[in-house]
Amino acid sequence: TQRLMDTTSSLYVCLLLFTSWVDPSHQIIVFAKQGSTAILPCKLSDLSNQTLTVSWRTIKNKVFERTNNQTYQGKAHKGRVNIPEDELIKGNCSLVLKHVKLSDSARYYSYLMKADRNDPINTVQLSVEAEETPEKRRNERVATL
């Protein structure tokens, strides 16, 4: 199972690399296994703003917001989300979501917050797949016999 997990992790990294080159006007889809870490890609093209404020939201909730070293984490994602500050100053506003849950499956929107407006950056659909347990595999095997 460790080998399968390593292979799965490698596939998610490849998916992340692939989605980094997708045109931001197209929706990006990220797949993650329940309990794993998902990275929702985001790249800022304009770094001229000294104080960067980036916000990630779903339709229902604010998920995460970072202004320099200050952060806000939404209740449903508290302790599981981050945009590393050292990455943000380089223009990488990707959201790191740890220990993903099935309930995290949603469309996520990232914004660059400005004094007079919020500029959309990216839209990412996160699809969380249920963790496959040994018991579930046994039951599936028995059902096919």
Image (spheres, grey):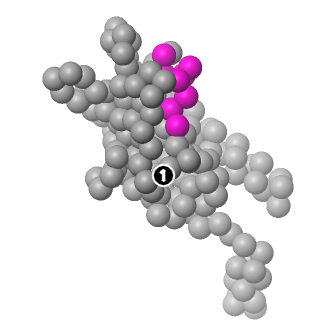
Q: Secondary structure at mark 1?
A: helix
Image quadrant occupied by the N terminus: bottom right
Q: Name the residue at the right extreme.
A: 2
Closer to us: 6 or 54 = 54
On the question of residue 113 being in view, the answer is yes
Q: Residue at x 47, y 63 (%)?
A: 103
What residue is shown at x 56% (from left), y 55% (from top)?
100
Residue 42 makes an appearance in the image:
no
Residue 129: where, in percent of width, then height?
Answer: 56, 63
* Residue situated in front as seen by the camera: 75 or 135: 75
Q: Which residues are magenta?
A: 82-89
Residue with the most extreme left position: 116
Q: Residue at x 45, y 33 (%)?
A: 71
Q: Position of residue 90 (x, y in %)?
A: 50, 15
Q: Quadrant of the C terminus?
A: bottom right
| Residue 67 colored in magenta in the image | no
Write the residue at 36% across / 25% down.
53
Label 1 CA crowd tier, 10 Å (few <14, some 14–19, many 20+): some
Q: Residue furthest front?
A: 70
Which residue type carries mark 1? Answer: His
**Residue holding disc 1:** 77
The correct choice, above or below, for 90 with respect to 33 in the image is above
Number of disc labels: 1
Does 15 sit above or below residue 49? below
Say which of 34 and 52 sits in front.
52
The part of the image, by quadrant, that contains residue 75 is: bottom left
Q: Position of residue 109 (x, y in %)?
A: 34, 42
- In the image, taking residue 15 as reference, residue 5 lies left or right, namely right
Whole-percent x, y for residue 143 in the image: 69, 90
